[in-house]
Image (cartoon, grey):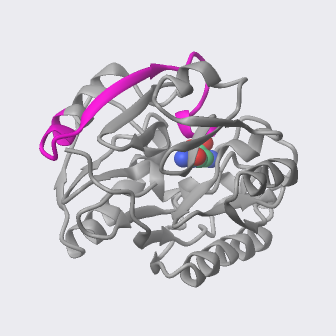
Amino acid sequence: MRRPFVPIDAALLRAVSPGWAGALRAVDDGPLDFAAAARQHADYARALVQAGVAVTVLPADPRQPDCCFIEDTAVVVGRHALATRPGAATRRGEVSPVVDALVSVGCIVHRMGPPATLEGGDVLRVGDVLYVGLSQRTNRAGVEALAAVAALEGLVVKPVELGDAMHLKGGVTLADADTAVVDADVVDPAQVAGWGLSVIEAAEPVGANVLALGRGRVLVPAEAPATAERLRRRGLAVRTVEGAALHRADGRLTCLSLRLPRPGGWCA
Ligand code: CIR
């Protein structure tokens, strides 16, 4: 069954932690700027609201520096959701409050246990398929845990070998239902084309992570102007949002929200 691609109906966000200084990052380029990160997070929330998304911002946890990257803590599949066991062990304490929030919006929440690990940044939905990165953060047992939940909604899971990349969606995201933006250093564009998608190569590495809002609208990092231009030339309505302070802790646009589609459809 092929469900329609629909606009994002609602999104759960989580505020930037007062412990932001301790966020995980691949490269330490000096102290992180909490005020700038909080401002950019608020701009992102505003952009979603202006796009018609019902946004709920959960409170931050001072003990969880990475808690604003809420996408990694759960995967929503129709009425079901899988609470993840993040591959980054220091992030496992982020999950419980997100489970409570998902239950309160009516999701049936499933759990995964060791040795499985999975982070939502590795899960890309394309129609009735979930592509899942085998990455630094997600292992085969994690993919199997997600496959069991996905099957409840008639979806299939396909693993994608990523080598040393952190997350699949650092290298490929959807700009709309059938157009992907790809960083060729992370994911082979020919492989993505094989998923039935039209491919745009990102001109900047952070440009590979965009957020499809539905109805041809796409949120793009302001730090990826050439990628934004390529998307405009494809006829997409681009809105940009600044994210440099969040990028310094390896955060991207999709990881700042858990999205729920309009009923009966799917969204990015
Ligand atoms: C981490 O390393 O886990 C965080 N500092 C960044 C997580 C970004 N998540 C995502 O892109 N889905």
Residue 169 magenta-highlighted: yes
Give the quarter of the image for residue 10.
Answer: bottom left
Tell me, yes or no, if residue 115 can be seen here. no
Residue at x 81% of width, y 61% of height: 222
Q: Position of residue 61 (x, y in %)?
A: 49, 67
Residue 104 magenta-highlighted: no
Seen from the viewer's position, the closer of residues 230 and 249 is 230
- 91 in relation to 160, above or below: below
Residue at x 18% of width, y 41% of height: 149
Residue at x 45% of width, y 41% of height: 124
Tell me, yes or no, if residue 105 can be seen here. yes
Looking at the rendering, the stretch of residues picked out in magenta corresponds to 148-170
Q: Position of residue 146 (x, y in %)?
A: 26, 36
Q: Position of residue 225 (x, y in %)?
A: 86, 54
- 67 in relation to 1, above or below: below
Seen from the viewer's position, the closer of residues 3 and 251 is 3
- 259 in relation to 72, above or below: below
Give the quarter of the image for residue 119.
Answer: top left
In the rendered view, does 195 fall on the left or right side of 115?
A: right
Give the quarter of the image for residue 65.
Answer: bottom right
In the rendered view, does 51 fall on the left or right side of 235?
A: left
